[in-house]
Image (spheres, helix red, strand yellow):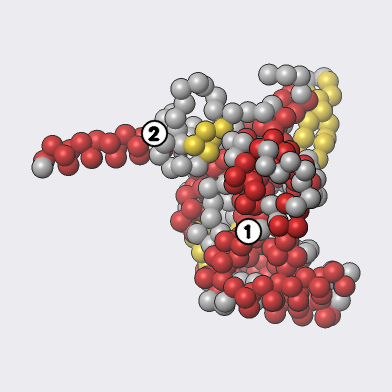
Amino acid sequence: MKNNFLNNVHFEQEVLVFDDYNILEEVDLLNSYPFDSYSSTPDLHYVNHWKKNLKKQFVSEKNFHGDLLYRSSKSNIEKWAKYTNISVDELLKILEKNNLKEKESNQIEEDKDYYEMKSESPFNESSILGVTPDAMQNLSKKYKLQEASSLYTELAKLEVFDFNSLLRFSKHFGMPSGLMDDIGFDIELDGNCLFFPFTSISVLNKKIAIYKQDFEWFKVIQTKNAPKIRSMIPESDLILINNVDENEAVVNYAKHHLTLLLGRLDAFNVSMHVEFQNGSFVPGVWFSDLFNFAYFQIAKALSNNVEVRECDNCGYIFEVTHKRQRFCPPLPHRKRSSCEMAYNNRLKREKKLKGEI
Ligand SMILES: [Zn+2]
């Protein structure tokens, strides 16, 4: 591995993971949550805290409509349309209209017109993703980000508004993003922990849509898939590329494009800090959520020019760490690759079926 400071960056963050998450149709369902089971004086303070902040989460998300319009793929907008039961054309019109309003306003909640547009936007889903009441009393496990080397490729397997993929991911890695607070929970957060018990469905799905699109560029660059890159470049840019028939020229275009995407404030943008440990100062970085960490991993993978391969089981790409690897690596707390096990089980079943015929 070449000398690259991203390989030596120090980070000690851990992620707290709950056993189970579910979809809540509206914030009022939080009323039945055991928020005060740790407190000797039960009150409404905790539940109101979460309700208030979850209602605000979408409104506080700056450039929501513009981001979704320009930074996600058409197929993800189609998935959104399917979920909301509004046609793709109609959704695109709303995105364009609200994007203009976002641009024209100073995007503060005190601005009445802006606030109204945000709270009434059809993208402002009332449902939230959150820990289940049972799991809330059982913080099952944690893992170190340092050990989650496959997080960025696993995160790319999420699909917009596909709750099964989201719940599967969250059970292993924790919810990728959301509101971070320990109010009403029997833990005390310190700076080294990531902990997301609840989030707005809209905000999370927007992050997934953008991440997937950015990751797609990473994938086509690392697999040198020139035909696919040509299909991803807008017509207006395609005619500007010299030697567009040469694969290298389009791969270079993709590299420049991904560099711009990673330059966004909500992409590859880590916070630095200094810790005092065992008598000396240790510089390190701090991640705000799992998307933030995944972008760091993409940047690192690009600068190390890692090899990626399609998994024989699920078809998604993984980072190759040993030569003969054919499957996605094991998830945190697992010894064996779940893709490898699923693949072998399927082979076994198929052999058994053949034997019976
Ligand atoms: Zn796989």
- Identify the amino acid type marked 2: Glu
Q: Position of residue 50 (x, y in %)?
A: 66, 64
User: 320 above or below 257?
Assistant: above
Secondary structure of the residue carrying numbered label 2: helix
Residue 48 image-quadrant placement: bottom right
Residue displayed at 72% across by 25% down: 7
Q: Residues within 10 Å of mark 2 (few under 14, many from 20)?
A: many
Residue displayed at 76% across by 23% down: 4
Q: Residue beneath label 1, please?
A: 73
Q: Residues within 10 Å of mark 1 (few under 14, many from 20)?
A: some
Q: Position of residue 114 (x, y in %)?
A: 81, 76
Residue displayed at 83% across by 31% down: 274
Q: Is residue 264 left or right of residue 244?
A: right
Q: Position of residue 261 (x, y in %)?
A: 75, 48
Q: Residue beneath label 2, please?
A: 340
Q: Nearer the viewer, residue 23 or 46?
A: 23
User: 321 above or below 49?
Assistant: above
Q: Position of residue 54 (x, y in %)?
A: 67, 66
Count of labels in the image? 2
Residue displayed at 46% across by 42% down: 315
Q: Is residue 91 left or right of residue 83?
A: right
Q: Nearer the viewer, residue 123 or 10?
A: 123
Q: Is residue 73 left or right of residue 337?
A: right
